[in-house]
Image: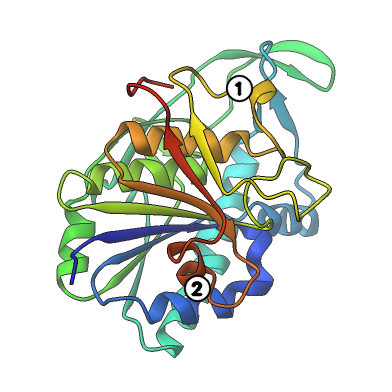
Amino acid sequence: MTDEITVVKCGGGLSHAQEDICRDLARLPVGRTVLVHGGAVELDRLADRLGVPQRRLTTPSGSSSRYTDPATLEVLLMALVGKIKPALVAALARHGARPVGLTGMDAGLVTAKRTAAHRAVLDGRTVVVRDDHSGRIRDVDPAVLVTLLEAGCLPVVSPPALGADGAVNVDADRLAAAIAGALAGTRPVRLVLLTAAPGVLRDPADESSLIPQIELPDEPVTEAAVHGGMTAKLQAARAALDAGVGTVVIADGRVPDPVSAALDGAGTTVRFTATLGSL
């Protein structure tokens, strides 16, 4: 029997599969699982109901992220902390787990640096953005997670992270990778990134074109190098591997028992081909 920790990330696009995911998670060994969740779909839905416009920021280099202005930050907190997380906690409890809901802000779990000002292409114009409450993860202190795991609980974690001046929106895939990497300093860790596809595909329009294994070269993961629109997940996978995570799998969250299937070999296993390098 191994004491390996499994960190699982599920996104908002899998809300219809939530019950099956939680049932499967509840069957995993007690005290060895952490669930990280996003919620882009529910955030967009709630923002539309509240009349809060949603926009994307694109850097001059071409990478894109949600424009988290103050109003969107409020909607994000309502969607992730007020709706998605309670539903996940309730579903896990129904199936016999002992879930505990957290954000990255709780107990100093995740700290991040907000980008105070940056250039971005917004609505077709290059502008300097100063009110974006998103940023990059700086540190993860896994102490509260270790305590909860030792108590037989299943932590359920979401953005935001804690910044110098309040909440900072961070990418949920990156959050899962950072948490997995921090826990890798205490025990062996594997990371499962669930998505609404069988894994990484050669052709995103053909679900039979699964790539069972990807070996990342010792260089940055870019849009041009990625099949099937999986850039963010492969960047997160690389960050996790860099931090000492033993196994990373990108797998289908829509199938029965999706986590167990991923751990049994379904989806795409991500490995390195060369000496570890930074993303």
Report helix, strand or loop for mark 2. Answer: helix
251 left or right, relative to 111: right
Distance CA(mark 1)–CA(mark 2): 33 Å
Q: Position of residue 85 (x, y in %)?
A: 49, 67
Residue at screen point 48% across, 61% down: 265
Q: Which residue is mark 2?
A: 88
Circle 1 residues within 10 Å: few <14, some 14–19, many ≥20 = some
Q: Nearer the viewer, residue 179 or 69?
A: 179
Near-viewer residue (211 or 8): 211
Q: Residue at x 70, y 56 (%)?
A: 41
Please provide percent x and percent y for residue 276: 33, 24
**Left or right: 71 in relation to 239:** right
Depicted 175 relative to depicted 128: above or below: below
Res. 229 in view: yes
Res. 86 visible in picture: no
Q: Which mark is residue 222?
A: 1
Amino acid type indicated by mark 1? Thr
